[in-house]
Image (cartoon, rainbow, N blue to C red):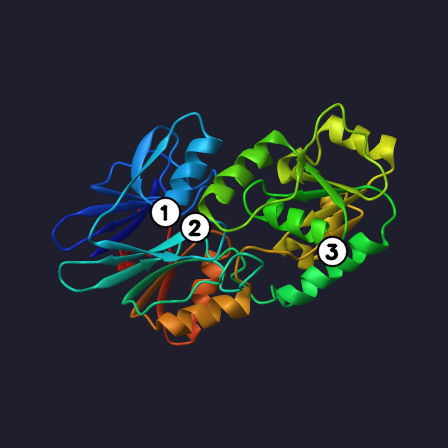
Amino acid sequence: MTVRYRDGVEIELSDGTRVVCDADDPDGDVTVVSHAHGDHLPAGEATAVCSPLTAALGTARRENPLHRTTDDRVALLPAGHVAGSRAALITDPDGTRYCYTGDVCTRSRLYLDGFEPPDADVLIVESTYGEPGYEFPPHETVAADIGEWLGETAAPVLLFGYALGRAQKLQLLADRAGRTVYTTDAVVRVNEAIEAHRDVSFPARGYGDDVDLGAGDALVLPMTTARIDWVEDLAGETGAETAGFSGWAVDDSFKYRGNYDVAFPLSDHPDFPELLALVDAVDPERVYTQHGSADELARHLTSEGYEAQALRQDQTSLGEF
């Protein structure tokens, strides 16, 4: 067997079939797309093994459509990361089972159920927070802290989170706190795709020039807009308080780097202890780590007795690391 990190993660099965996961320009025999974040979607029009919701979101968020297909060798498991996200359990003709998590989260949050790790021989796991020191409070505690801040803050608020994932949770939390919620067209498109596939609805109204933010209002914005001039001007003109939401907020530097008034560790990824628990639950013979703190997580897993290595581009086996 061969596991390689090139353009995405490539798994070559014993019969020569190449399964390529989350590639920008996939060229395998089987293409897998785990979820509809931009760094996991193909750049152009593509056909992939993915969930129906990921296909809808990928098409809604890009000019080039994402078409869904299936493959008997690939089972998709809810990954708990964002709406529609899936881990791939790939069965080789020789019986070897590969689990590619993509981005994943084992915590249940609002309308998302946490990932339930399967049995697998080879695990390819994300490692965004794959080093000691990254440990998040329980989701219920974070949600309560956010609700308390929203309830106590008289000014309008600007809430920054990824357009797919945190933006939907922020809408629900702001609505729960009694805020009138607004958001951008980009987030509305994501909302509509999720609402068409899931039993959930989002309360936000479209934000435009005709909206004057006032006390009791919340504007949910994509994280990428946080430093755009009109957003800074809006905060100044309305006296709005700004809040950032990310697992990185466990470190105070996140708040200051983003110039937020407040920050909360609301994350769609596992923290370090949750990553270790995920690996233990799968109990694989080999572990490959990727993204984020891949080296640190692989070293720790090796110290715990696992055969583990960080995936680096164009290296194809543990012996090449």
The one nearer the camera, 142 or 55, is 55
- Comparing marks 1 and 3, which lies closer to the viewer? 1
- Comparing marks 3 and 2, which lies closer to the viewer? 2
Nearer the N terminus, badge 1 or badge 3? 1
Identify the residue at image location x=58%, y=32%: 186
Residue 134 lies, in percent from the top left, at 60, 63
Residue for badge 2: 85
Q: Residues within 10 Å of mark 1 (few under 14, many from 20)?
A: many
Query: Pointers 3 and 2 in contact (CB under 8 A)?
Result: no
Residue 197 lies, in percent from the top left, at 44, 45
Q: Is residue 136 visible?
A: no
Identify the residue at image location x=42%, y=76%: 304
Could you say which quadrant of the image residue 43 lies in? top left
Residue 190 horizontal side relative to residue 238, left or right: left
Identify the residue at image location x=62%, y=64%: 139
Q: Is residue 46 above or below residue 243?
A: above
Residue for badge 3: 252
